[in-house]
Image (cartoon, coloured by chain):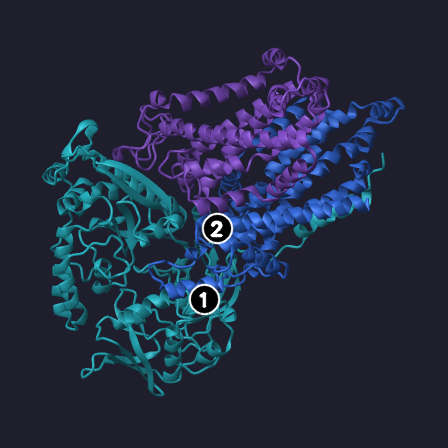
């Protein structure tokens, strides 16, 4: 037996211990003048025209500006870089923007009409415009971006559309020379805009740091440093906040509101996101019968779900349109399981053995309900509660909770279960809200189609008069409620955890904007 | 899994059954382990009779009730209820079914694959052995959880896929140990004798070789059940295991973890259930190894 | 010895080829992998064909595999679907964090396990033996994610001693490293105890005792030295467990490593990225085991005969 080789062992141990002695990076405890924001995932890219996720949109909101913007009350106003804008009366396809003089990007480039044109040209380049930008391109249907003079910019659309300014609020404008000359992989990790902040550091999956942009001419932000940290596990996010090592965290479960309020603050805010059960027209044939769809709506006690499962964090609705365009006369379906039973009887689904309804041929009413887990407030629990109610009226329910990652593709490809829970975000413009049900819309997941609705839609998209638009939208909401393409549920309440020292109010459009926030004691 | 190395040199057991019976009476720890396992098995088999409530449908009027013994608890829900008013105890009882089914079926699959390959590898040796051992090394080189995640992501989540993944990827320890045993046995007199009287290879393996490798297989299988139960819970925790509407310990733990500060019972009981079951299995595994492996009885 | 190492090297190459073939094959379980890249409704046939050509899916599978290996040898693991940048870059950026976590877990595991194993073996059937072995049994039965949650609750939330998540100074490393190393610690402690007990019963140790060597010297010089050999053999395998455990631990502790990247990639259906991570992790495992083998031959000359 050969003696144990000590030097070998020492070498091994020092290799093992070395990484412990050399720590990587700085500690994450927030400094007095910096704010730490926790989101579930990190940005993949901060390219102004390639990003697609909400966390990225939140970050870019601080770095880039656009031609229009939403104020804290979700009113659309001209962007910080715009003096005024108008729709030409003689040609409704032309939108003209007067830019403010002497605006510069954080790298010193001038922000003029040519720079704005360059940004739109870049976004419309099919090799570049992706994600959210491709969605905006589809909705804007731009024919041309034109620099008329140094400070006059015109955007010309293919057809007249009153909602163009709403979609412009997210069309980011980046420094033209930088974005033209820098390779794509490099701009993906280093954004140059004209917004109140500029990015100073980004270690992927660790943190992104932003500091005030010295060339910014608008009101100076008070917070000296924003640190965006991706923390995937909800459990860890909450405990970072409770411990005081984070200032803002998203997707707080309602059950934790009292706990958070003991140490920090929790904000619940009715957002624009509508949560509903989509009723597919390609699934179970019974669902093509309007009476069955209405019966499903009567069967579910949505108020009880909001109270018990969401702890009141939801606003019941019978429409899929957000205020201010919501029709106040559209009332939600009443919880009335007797009425639901009658409607199902009329539709030919009579109560059979084992409390399961059957048709004349004796086939049971077997319906699949799918719900996601991990995307919306208590999504899996809400879906399961709805399932309980649907079983009570005699539906042989097959309930499936699917993790979010696996959940969406079948819905997009129209091969989901018969019923599926989903939420739809909003830009607080009624047309965008109701377009979810338009037959050619890519978000009409259930293939619902109603001719009356379509003729109203065709009227709506060319109508520029606000009062008339309101009338049309109200009529469309009546149609939608009566024909019940959804089981209508509620507007989601977004709950944020906020540290005691941060003075900040969240926005209803799920965006985190810290430009006016301040740090107190 | 830890059995692999320790069992590798196991000698063939003699009258293991009788020794086992004698030893169990002397080992209080083994009794505890067996006790835990018996409870879990009974829960799994008799779930519909034991569960006081429907594990899937709750009552929205009794949501988030704490366990019966703490303030605000209700006697009819001994371990409390979740945010849909479902009985935690009933869900734990039904959850035992999934854990046991996954654990046992996956281990049976892994055992069948591993024993077959191990027998072939050990009995024929040469190129067959080389190929099979290379496959084993390839398998071992994958970080298991990543491989399982990759396959689940491609195939889609669900009980069947999960069992398949856990089963197929767990064969190596059996293969290695059986191979080692067979190599020793191959030259033994009774095998030589069988060969001499013209028994077919299959018959020799089945009648003479396999019975003599049973002891280490049982020990490995026990430890593998523990590993598989944990893997199932881990994959479910990451959202790629059993469908979330099935009541399982992994789902319950995943759903309850954010509420630990306000409703500790949501995550605590499933967490304990997993831990105790795995502990029970490991204790029994330890004991079986001691019984079958005289080398370790110093 | 050179011959033995050469043989091990050839075996390792075969294993690596097998690993890549398997990980590569998984992609084709999905049917046509091009549909992982596009939504079939939103894209025209022309666009789909373009993508097919761009990612090389138009070639026969064996050709694709050979090309994949060829590219991989040059460090080119293709583009991530979700990130749009080379998979290699994404992984290499995050590998140091994973290795740091795995090594730290390893160090903690050994630092706890070896003394515990020695104590348990030398004070057999005392309370110290029972306590450490019961703790080890418990540690071996504790699911990684459950342990992580409990540690955060106790040390970060209740006591406030350590950060909840993230990477930074050494204080950030402690809880994740314990979480990831617990299983290995438990296993190693049990193994040290049983091998040490076995070694201490051997003739040469009895001889040493009979010759009047002090008990301490007997245990450390004769017992431990030999008892550690099987432990060293398993170091490589254990490292594989640590890499696997890192997948869950990194998610809980928001640790910016490759395991978490894998979980995210799966969430985004970025199968080529997951594939590359699996292959690189396996490669790492093979290399480390090769090193362990070399180390082992240095420690125990008998192996050279094997």
Instruction: Say if A487 sits above or below A456 in the image.
Output: above
Q: What is the display colour for chain B?
A: purple
Quarter occupied by the C terminus of chain A: bottom left
Q: In the drawing, does residue A326 fall left or right of residue A10? A: left
Tell me what residue is drawn at x 65 percent, y 38 percent. Answer: B133
Residue found at the far front of this picture = B198
Badge number at residue C58: none
Task: Same chain for labels 1 and 2? Say yes or no.
Answer: no
Tell me if I can see residue C203 in this picture: yes
Q: Which residue is mark 2?
A: C28
Palette colour of chain A: cyan
Q: Chain of mark 2?
A: C
C-alpha gap between disc 1 and disc 2: 32 Å
Question: Residue B194 at x, y = what percent?
Answer: 67, 18
Q: How many marks?
A: 2
Residue bearing mark 1? A46
Where residue C207 appears, x then y in whole percent?
Answer: 87, 23
Q: Nearer the viewer, residue A19 or A289?
A: A289
Q: Residues within 10 Å of mark 2 (few under 14, many from 20)?
A: few
Secondary structure beneath dot 2 equals: helix
Q: Nearer the viewer, mark 1 or mark 2?
A: 2
Q: Is residue C127 above or below residue A291?
A: above
Q: Position of residue A411 (x, y in %)?
A: 31, 51
Residue A328 can be seen in this image: no
Q: Colour of chain C?
A: blue
């Amino acid at each position: 037996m050969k003696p144990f080789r000590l030097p070998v062992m020492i070498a091994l141990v020092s290799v093992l211990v070395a990484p412990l002695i050399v720590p990587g990076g700085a500690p994450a405890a927030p400094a007095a003048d910096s704010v730490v924001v926790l989101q579930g995932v990190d940005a993949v890219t901060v390219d102004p025209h390639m990003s697609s996720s909400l966390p990225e949109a939140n970050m870019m909101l601080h770095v880039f500006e656009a031609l229009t913007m939403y104020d804290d009350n979700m009113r659309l106003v001209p962007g910080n870089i715009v003096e005024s804008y108008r729709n030409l009366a003689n040609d409704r396809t032309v939108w003209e923007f007067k830019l403010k003089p002497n605006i510069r990007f954080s790298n010193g480039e001038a922000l003029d009409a040519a720079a704005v044109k360059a940004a739109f040209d870049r976004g419309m380049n099919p090799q570049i415009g992706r994600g959210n930008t491709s969605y905006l391109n589809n909705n804007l249907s731009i024919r041309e971006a034109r620099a008329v003079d140094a400070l006059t910019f015109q955007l010309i659309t293919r057809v007249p559309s009153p909602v163009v300014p709403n979609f412009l609020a997210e069309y980011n404008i980046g420094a033209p020379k930088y974005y033209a000359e820098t390779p794509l992989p490099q701009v993906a990790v280093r954004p140059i805009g004209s917004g109140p902040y500029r990015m100073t550091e980004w270690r992927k999956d660790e943190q992104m740091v932003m500091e005030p942009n010295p060339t910014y001419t608008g009101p100076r932000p008070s917070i000296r440093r924003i640190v965006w940290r991706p923390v995937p596990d909800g459990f860890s996010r909450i405990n970072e906040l409770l411990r005081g090592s984070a200032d803002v965290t998203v997707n707080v479960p309602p059950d934790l509101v009292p706990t958070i309020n003991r140490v920090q603050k929790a904000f619940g805010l009715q957002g624009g996101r509508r949560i509903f059960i989509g009723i597919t027209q390609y699934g179970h044939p019974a669902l093509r019968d309007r009476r069955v769809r209405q019966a499903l709506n009567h069967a579910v006690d949505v108020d009880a779900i909001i109270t018990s499962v969401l702890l009141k964090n939801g606003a019941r609705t019978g429409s899929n349109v957000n205020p201010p365009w919501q029709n106040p006369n559209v009332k939600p379906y009443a919880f009335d399981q007797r009425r639901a039973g009658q409607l199902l009887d009329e539709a030919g689904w009579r109560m059979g053995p084992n409390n399961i309804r059957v048709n004349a041929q004796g086939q049971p009413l077997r319906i699949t309900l799918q719900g996601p887990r991990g995307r919306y407030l208590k999504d899996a629990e809400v879906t399961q509660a709805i399932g309980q109610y649907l079983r009570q009226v005699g539906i042989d329910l097959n309930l499936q909770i699917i993790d979010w990652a696996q959940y969406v593709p079948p819905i997009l490809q129209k091969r989901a279960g018969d019923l599926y829970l989903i939420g739809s975000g909003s830009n607080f413009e009624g047309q965008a809200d109701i377009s979810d049900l338009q037959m050619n819309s890519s978000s009409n997941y259930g293939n619902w189609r109603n001719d009356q609705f379509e003729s109203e839609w065709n009227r709506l998209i060319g109508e520029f008069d606000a009062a008339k638009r309101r009338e049309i939208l109200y009529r469309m909401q009546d149609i939608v409620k009566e024909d019940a393409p959804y089981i209508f549920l509620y507007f989601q309440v977004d709950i944020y955890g906020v540290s005691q020292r941060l003075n900040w109010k969240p926005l209803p459009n799920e965006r985190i904007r810290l430009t006016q926030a301040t740090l107190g004691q | 899994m830890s059995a692999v190395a320790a069992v590798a040199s196991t000698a063939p057991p003699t009258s293991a059954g009788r020794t086992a019976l004698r030893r169990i009476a002397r080992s209080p720890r083994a009794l505890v382990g067996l006790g835990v396992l018996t409870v879990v098995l009974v829960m799994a088999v008799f779930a519909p009779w034991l569960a006081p409530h429907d594990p899937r449908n709750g009552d929205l009027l009794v949501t988030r009730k704490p366990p019966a013994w703490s303030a605000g608890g209700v006697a009819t829900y001994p371990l409390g209820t979740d945010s849909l008013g479902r009985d935690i105890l009933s869900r734990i009882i039904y959850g035992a079914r999934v854990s046991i089914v996954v654990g046992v079926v996956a281990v049976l699959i892994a055992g069948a694959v591993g024993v077959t390959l191990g027998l072939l590898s050990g009995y024929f040796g040469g190129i067959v052995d080389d190929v099979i051992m290379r496959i084993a090394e390839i398998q071992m080189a994958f970080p298991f959880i990543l491989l399982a995640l990759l396959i689940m992501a491609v195939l889609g989540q669900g009980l069947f896929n999960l069992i398949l993944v856990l089963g197929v990827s767990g064969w190596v320890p059996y293969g290695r140990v059986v191979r080692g045993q067979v190599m020793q046995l191959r030259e033994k007199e009774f095998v030589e004798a069988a060969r001499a009287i013209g028994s077919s290879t299959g018959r020799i393996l089945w009648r003479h070789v396999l019975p003599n490798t049973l002891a280490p297989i049982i020990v490995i299988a026990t430890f593998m059940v523990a590993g598989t139960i944990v893997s199932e819970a881990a994959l479910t925790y990451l959202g790629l295991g059993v469908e979330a509407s099935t009541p399982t310990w992994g789902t319950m733990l995943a759903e309850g973890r954010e509420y630990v500060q306000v409703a500790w019972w949501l995550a605590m009981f499933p967490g304990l259930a997993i831990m105790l079951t795995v502990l029970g299995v490991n204790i029994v595994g330890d004991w079986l190894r001691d019984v079958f492996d005289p080398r370790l009885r110093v | 010895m050179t011959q033995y190492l050469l043989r091990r090297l050839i075996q390792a190459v075969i294993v690596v080829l097998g690993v890549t073939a398997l990980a590569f094959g998984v992609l084709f379980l999905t049917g046509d992998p091009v549909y992982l890249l596009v939504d079939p409704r939103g894209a025209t046939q022309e666009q789909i064909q373009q993508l097919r050509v761009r990612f090389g899916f138009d070639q026969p599978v064996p050709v694709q595999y050979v090309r994949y290996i060829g590219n991989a040898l040059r460090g080119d693991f293709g583009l991530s679907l979700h990130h749009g940048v080379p998979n290699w870059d994404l992984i290499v950026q995050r590998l140091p964090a994973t290795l740091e976590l795995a090594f730290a877990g390893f160090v903690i595991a050994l630092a706890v396990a070896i003394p515990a194993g020695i104590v348990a073996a030398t004070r057999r059937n005392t309370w110290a033996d029972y306590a450490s072995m019961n703790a080890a049994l418990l540690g071996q039965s504790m699911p990684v994610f459950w342990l992580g949650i409990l540690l955060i609750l106790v040390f970060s939330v209740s006591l406030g001693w350590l950060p909840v998540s993230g990477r930074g100074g050494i204080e950030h490393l402690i809880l994740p490293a314990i979480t990831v190393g617990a299983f290995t610690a438990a296993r190693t402690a049990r193994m040290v105890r049983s091998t040490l007990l076995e070694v201490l019963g051997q003739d040469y140790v009895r001889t040493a005792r009979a010759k009047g060597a002090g008990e301490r010297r007997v245990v450390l010089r004769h017992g431990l030295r030999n008892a550690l050999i099987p432990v060293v053999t398993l170091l490589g395998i254990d490292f594989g467990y640590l890499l696997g455990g890192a997948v869950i631990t990194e998610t809980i502790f928001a640790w910016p490593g490759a395991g978490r990247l894998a979980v995210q990639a799966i969430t985004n259906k970025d199968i080529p990225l997951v594939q590359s991570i699996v292959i690189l992790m396996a490669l790492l495992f093979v290399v480390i085991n090769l090193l362990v083998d070399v180390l082992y031959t240095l420690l125990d000359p008998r192996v050279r005969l094997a």
